[in-house]
């Protein structure tokens, strides 16, 4: 993207892109530095989790795994028919079927 902007003589846009990249790198690398390269300040007490929050977290984990990972294995919908034009491949172009006319 930077070379395309420079090749198009968009120097201002290139400067903005470089500054935003540097700002993003600083933001995310600062977290990594705080986590792994600094001494811990002390122990943090861990509060016990009640039954209701634990149940809510468990339901969210199961829903995330079901909808995101295992959805295709438990899908209740049928796949698109072979003549569907919702997705076309370069090797097989979409062929629209003409509507049937009543006699």
Image (cartoon, rainbow, N blue to C red):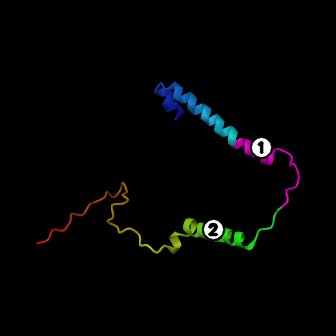
Tag 1: Cα neighbours inside 10 Å, few (<14), some, or many (≥20)?
Answer: few
Q: Reply above or below: 6 against 77.
A: above
Q: Reply above or below: 88 against 75.
A: above
Q: Is residue 16 left or right of residue 87?
A: right
Extent of the magenta region: 28-45
Q: Which residue is tagged 1?
A: 33
Q: Is residue 66 left or right of residue 97?
A: right
x then y, percent, for residue 99:
21, 65
- Nearest the camera: 98 or 20? 20
Name the residue rendered at 18%, 68% in the picture: 100
Total labels drawn: 2
Name the residue rendered at 31%, 65% in the picture: 83
Q: Is residue 66 left or right of residue 79?
A: right
Q: Which residue is tagged 2?
A: 60
Q: Residue furthest right?
A: 42
x then y, percent, for residue 44:
85, 56
For the C terminus, give its image quadrant.
Answer: bottom left
């Amino acid at each position: 993207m930077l070379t395309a902007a420079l090749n198009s003589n968009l120097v201002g846009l290139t400067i903005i892109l470089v500054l935003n990249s540097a700002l993003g790198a600083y933001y995310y690398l600062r977290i990594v530095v705080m986590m792994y390269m600094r001494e811990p300040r002390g122990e943090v007490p861990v509060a016990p989790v009640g039954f209701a929050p634990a149940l809510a977290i468990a339901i969210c984990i199961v829903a995330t795994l079901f909808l995101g990972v295992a959805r295709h294995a438990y899908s209740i919908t049928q796949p698109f028919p072979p003549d569907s034009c919702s997705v076309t491949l370069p090797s097989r172009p979409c062929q629209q079927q003409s509507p049937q006319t009543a006699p």
